Image (cartoon, rainbow, N blue to C red):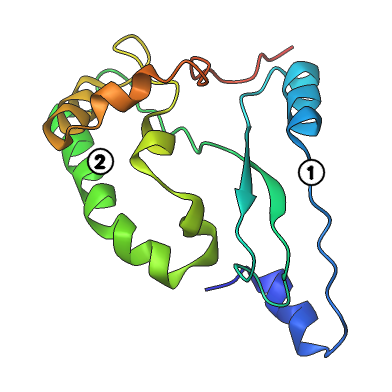
Amino acid sequence: MIPGVVRQHEATGKKLCYIGVTKENIEQLNKKFQATWLHTVLPPNTLPHQSEPLGIGVNRAYAAVHESFDEEKAYKTVMAVAKIAPEMKELHALWRVWSPELMTCGLSEENAHPGAVRAYKELGWWTKSDNPLCTPMTYPATN
């Protein structure tokens, strides 16, 4: 599945032009907005008529729940994503950048739900959260 707006432009028959971003662009945006986007590269042919690698910014989609959220539900949510992720990578272009490393990037015992941590440990992914390139996951500051 390709994002709807891309499909709409593709249907016009006109040439598509993708404008990528650099790692430096993402770092500037993160600094300006106190965000934690990651830079990654979509391989060629991930999107329609995309013949070259394309630099993009990825929102880690950090999904958090209140500490009172049921531990078993948090655990099952992570396990469900882990189960469907390999198939989603084949079905949806934007899932192709997904990895266990990206899913745990920036997580810690302090900012992740205990049920999620339990699932990550059971999957053997928790040590992947120790990546020194991943800043701790936070939400942007509000004014």
* Residue at x 50%, y 21% (from the top left corner): 134
Residue type (three-letter) at the residue carrying disc 2:
Val
Whole-percent x, y for residue 48 in the image = 68, 76
Would you identify the image quadrant in which residue 36 lies? top right
Whole-percent x, y for residue 21 in the image = 79, 43
- Dot 1 or dot 2: first in sequence order is 1
Q: Secondary structure at mark 1?
A: loop
- Pick the residue in front: 140 or 43: 43
The crowd level at tag 1 (other Cα within 10 Å; few <14, some 14-19, many 20+) is some
- Residue 21's mark? 1
Q: Is residue 88 left or right of residue 13?
A: left
User: CA gap, disc 1 to disc 2?
Assistant: 30 Å
* Residue at x 17%, y 32% (from the top left corner): 124
* Residue at x 88%, y 85% (from the top left corner): 14
Q: Is residue 41 left or right of residue 98?
A: right
Would you identify the image quadrant in which residue 94 lies? bottom right
Q: Check the image and report above or below for 114 versus 122.
A: above
Q: Check the image and report above or below for 99 versus 101.
A: below
Whole-percent x, y for residue 4 in the image = 65, 72
Disc 2 target residue:
78
